[in-house]
Amino acid sequence: MGAVTLENVSFAYEGAEEAKVLQGIDLDIRPGEFVSIIGANGSGKTTLCNAIRGFAPKFFKGEFAGRVLINGRDIADEEIGELAKEIGFVFQNPFTQMSGTARTVYDELAFGLGNLGLPRDEIIARVDEMVQLARLQDLVDRNPFQLSGGQQQRVALSSILVMAQDILVIDEPTSQLDPQSTDDVFELIERMKGQGRTIVLVEHKMEHVAAFSDRVVLMDAGRIVDVGTPREIFANPRTAAIGTRLPQALTIARQLEQVGIRFEVSPLTTDELVGQLEPRMVR
Amino acid sequence: MAFIELEDVVFSYPNGVTAVDGVSFSVEEGESVAIVGQNGAGKTTTVKMINGLLRPSSGRAVVNGIATTDRTAAATARDVGYVFQNPDDQIFNSTAFAEIEYGLKRQKIDADAARQRVEAAAEICGIRADLETNPYDLPLSIRKFVTIASVIAADTKVVILDEPTAGQDLVGLNRIAGIIGHLQQQGKIVITITHDMEFVAEHFQRVIVMANKRVVVDDLQGSVFRNPDVMREARLTPPVIAQALDRLGLDDVPLHVEEIAKRLAG
C-alpha cells in the first residue's frame, strides 16, 4: 500500500474550469520514499501538493475528479483537520505559514502541538529537540514576524516538522534561503527520511533534488510527463526543454556537448563532471 | 565621484540591533554588481540605505552627489529603484497595470506617456498578458515580475533587485537575465542580491561578498569564487564551473565553459 496514491486526478479552479491545472495524474509514493516534483512554474506542482493534502478541492474550490488515498484511505471521506495528523504541509510562502498568534519562535513551534492537546512536558521536550535539530537556538525568543525571509522559512518548516507526521509535503522550502541554510534544510529533511517519513518535495535547486531524491516526478502543463531516478529524468533532453533547470554539472556538460564533447554518463555532480573530463585534458 | 558612494555606513535598529556595521563601496555609472552572502549578512539593509528607505546611523550614503540624509527618501528613490525581496511588501494595487502605473501617476506623468511606459516595462518583464490581472491572482514568481516592471517603468538610474532569482524556474531565470541585460544596455547601474552563485557567475563580473554585517571582499568573480577563505567565511559554495575549473588545474582562467573545451582532446 502506498503512503500517497493519486488515481486519475484532475483539477480545475472554480471560475477557470476550462484550464485544468491537473490532468489525469497517477502517482504512487511508497512509505519512506523521497519524491521530488519538478517542472516549470505554473506546471501544477503546488496544486498537486494541495490535492495530496486535500486543500484542493476542500479549501481551493474547483472541479475535482479522481481519488487521493493517504495510507490507503480516500481523503474525500476524511476531515481536513484529521488529515493534519498524518500529513505535514509546508507552504511555499513562509509568510502565510505562520500562526499569526505566537509572539516568539518558541511559541510558534509549540502552537500546533498545543492544538493537538499534548501534555505540556511533551510539548516542551519536542520543541526543545526541534530547536536543536534546526539550529534555531538564537531565534527562540524573537518575534516570528520580525525575522528575515530566510529565518522565517526555517521556522515555518520546523513548526511543521515538530508535529512528526508520517508524510511531509514540502513546497519550495529553500526559495528564500542562502546556500548554507539550504544545505541545513536538506540535512533536516534527510533526517526526517531517516526516521522513515515519506517526503514529497517541490524544489528548484536541482543539485539537491539530484542528491537526495529516490524518484523525481516531472510535470508540464498539469500532467506528469516523466517519473524516474534523478539521472533518468535529468538526462532526458525533454526535461530542460520544458523549462526546468538542470544540476549545474549537467548544464556545463550540455554546453560542452554543443561543441562536440561527449559524455558517457550525464554528470549530476561536480565529481561526476570532473571525473569524466580529467582523463581527456591535454597537458 | 561615483554615482553611489557608501562611506563607512552603519545601520542600527531602534532596539539596538546592528544590521550593517561599517560598509564602504562605490558603484560607477553603468556598472553592475552582485551582492552575495548569508541571510542576515546585511545585504538588504545595505541596499535600502542606497535607495533611501533606511538612513545610516553613522557614515554617509551618497547618491548622485547628494547624501541620502540631505534629501527626502522619495527624492533618492527617483534615482534608485528598489525591488523588494518579497513582492507582497511592495504590491497594493488591484491590477498589475495600476501597480506598475502607480509611481508614474505620483510623478504626474501624463496618462498616455504613463501607459506607454507601463506597456514597455511589462513587455520587458514578459507580463503583458497579465496587466489586467489582480497581482495576487498571479503566482509568486510572476508577481515578482510585476514589481520589477514597476521599478523599470520608473526609469531610475539605479535598479536594485533583491533576490529576483528566488523560486524562479529556467524560464524565469532567463527572463531575469534578459531584464538585467536590457538595463545594462541602457547604461543603468544594476545591483542584484542573490543566493544563486551559478547566476552570478553567468551574469556579473563584479561581486561583493558580505558576512557578519560587513563586506568581506569586493572583486571580480574569478577571484572571489576562487578564494577558499572568503567562501568559508561567508559560508558560500562556489558555482560548479569554478569548482570544476579549479579541480582541472585551470585556476587562472575566466569562469567560462569554453576554457574547458579549449583544453580537451576531442
Image (cartoon, coloured by chain):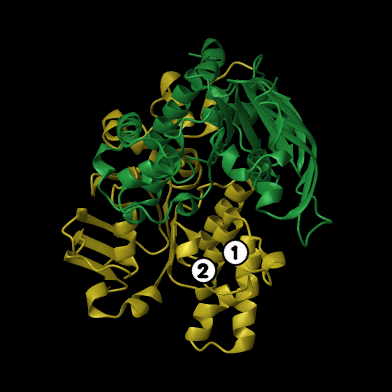
Please say if the residues under marks 1 and 2 sit with CB atoms less than 8 Å apart: yes
Instruction: Classify mark 2: residues with Cα within 10 Å, few (<14), some (14-19) or many (20+).
Output: many
Chain letter for mark 1, please: B
Can residue B136 be seen by looking at this rendering?
yes
Q: Which mark is residue B91?
A: 2
For the residues marked 1 and 2, what is the alpha-carbon distance in whole angstroms?
A: 9 Å
Q: x%, y% of residue B71?
A: 27, 80
Q: x%, y% of residue B159?
A: 44, 64
Instruction: Classify mark 1: residues with Cα within 10 Å, few (<14), some (14-19) or many (20+).
Output: some
Quickly name the residue at label 1: B136
Considering only vertical position in the picture, is B216 above or below B50? above
Q: Is residue A155 left or right of residue A226?
A: left
Mark nearest the camera among 1 and 2 is 1
Secondary structure of residue under mark 1 = helix
Q: Amino acid at mark 1?
A: Tyr
Mark 1 or mark 2: which comes first in sequence? 2
Measuring 57% from the left and 78% from the top, which residue is drawn there? B101
* Residue in front for this viewpoint, B152 or A205: A205
Can residue B206 be seen by looking at this rendering?
no
Q: x%, y% of residue B210?
A: 29, 46
Q: x%, y% of residue B139?
A: 62, 56
| Residue A46 found in image quarter | top right
Which image quarter is the N terminus of chain B in? bottom left
Which chain does yellow denote in the image?
Answer: B
Considering only vertical position in the picture, is B120 above or below B222? below
Which chain does green denote in the image?
Answer: A
Chain letter for mark 2, please: B
